């Protein structure tokens, strides 16, 4: 037969947990980033009799946080996107400084090279024009080698960043797997 006192005690215990959770929520009402907790109650397994089932009380199934999953996913996605675009902006800024800067980029050397070429085309027999053209060609060649080295260094930096991120992710997943194994061992030993 169903124990009436035990059924009443399960209700008292469940609602004691609910009141404690409510007190916790009230205590943290002004805590930044706090999300309210909610107690989820469920029925205990009823006992079967020839005339039907009789309830045996209530149990606390879980304590959950009251958060909007859609908003949480949007915030995570936005935060990830902002980080991605910040990195992209940084890298394109470095490339722009290498290639497009009007003082130290490729543009001044190209203009000087084509200007010397035009001067040489205007007076092909001029030895000084030929020498200036060769000097500008060497300068342009040196500058393109410097830019190539800088771009290779930038690529290596990005590759290193990716390798470091993969290493960090692998370390974190290894740690999570270890924690999950420890939790499973504790759960098994508690049985």
Image: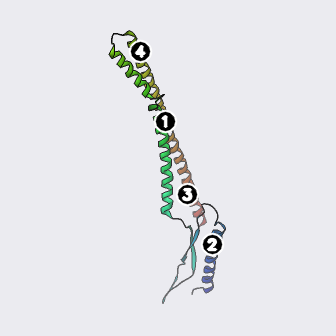
Q: Say which label, 1 or 3, has the lower sequence index.
A: 1
Q: CA distance from mark 2 to mark 3?
A: 30 Å
Is the C-beta separation of discs 2 and 3 under 8 Å?
A: no
Q: Quadrant of the C terminus?
A: bottom right
Q: Residues within 10 Å of mark 3 (few under 14, many from 20)?
A: few
Residue pointed to by mark 4? 132
Q: Residues within 10 Å of mark 2 (few under 14, many from 20)?
A: some
Q: Say which label, 3 or 4, has the lower sequence index.
A: 4
Seen at 49% across and 63% down, the residue is 69
> Which element is circle 1 on?
helix
> Which element is circle 3 on?
helix
Q: CA distance from mark 4 to mark 1?
A: 31 Å
Q: Residue furthest bottom?
A: 51
Q: Residues within 10 Å of mark 4 (few under 14, many from 20)?
A: some
Seen at 48% across and 30% down, the residue is 150
Residue pointed to by mark 1? 94
In-front residue for pair 180/150: 150
Residue pointed to by mark 2? 22
Residue pointed to by mark 3? 180
Q: Single out the mark in the foreground, 1 or 3.
A: 1
Is the C-beta separation of discs 1 and 2 under 8 Å?
A: no
The answer to whether residue 161 is left or right of residue 16 is left
Q: CA distance from mark 3 to mark 4?
A: 71 Å
In the rendered view, would you say 107 is above or below 125? below
Q: CA distance from mark 1 to mark 3?
A: 43 Å
Q: Single out the mark in the foreground, 3 or 4.
A: 4
Q: Say which label, 2 or 3, has the lower sequence index.
A: 2
Q: Indicate the position of residue 78 as horizontal and vertical percent values.
A: 49, 54
Q: CA distance from mark 1 to mark 2?
A: 53 Å
Q: Say which label, 2 or 4, has the lower sequence index.
A: 2
Q: Residue furthest front?
A: 122
């Amino acid at each position: 037969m169903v124990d009436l006192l035990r059924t009443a005690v399960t209700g008292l215990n469940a609602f004691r947990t609910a009141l404690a959770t409510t007190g916790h929520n009230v205590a943290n009402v002004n805590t930044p980033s706090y999300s309210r907790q909610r107690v989820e109650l469920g029925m205990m397994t009823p006992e079967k009799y020839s005339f039907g089932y009789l309830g045996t009380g209530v149990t606390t199934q879980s304590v959950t946080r009251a958060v909007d999953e859609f908003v949480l996913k949007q915030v995570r996605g936005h935060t990830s996107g902002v980080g991605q675009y910040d990195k992209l902006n940084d890298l394109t800024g470095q490339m722009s400084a290498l290639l497009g800067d009007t003082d130290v980029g490729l543009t001044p050397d190209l203009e000087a090279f084509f200007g010397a070429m035009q001067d040489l085309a205007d007076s092909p027999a001029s030895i000084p024009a030929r020498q200036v053209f060769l000097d500008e060609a060497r300068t342009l060649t040196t500058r393109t080698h410097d830019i190539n080295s800088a771009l290779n260094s930038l690529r290596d930096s990005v590759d290193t960043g990716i390798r470091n991120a993969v290493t960090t992710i692998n370390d974190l997943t290894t740690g999570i797997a270890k924690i999950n194994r420890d939790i499973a061992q504790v759960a098994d030993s508690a049985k």
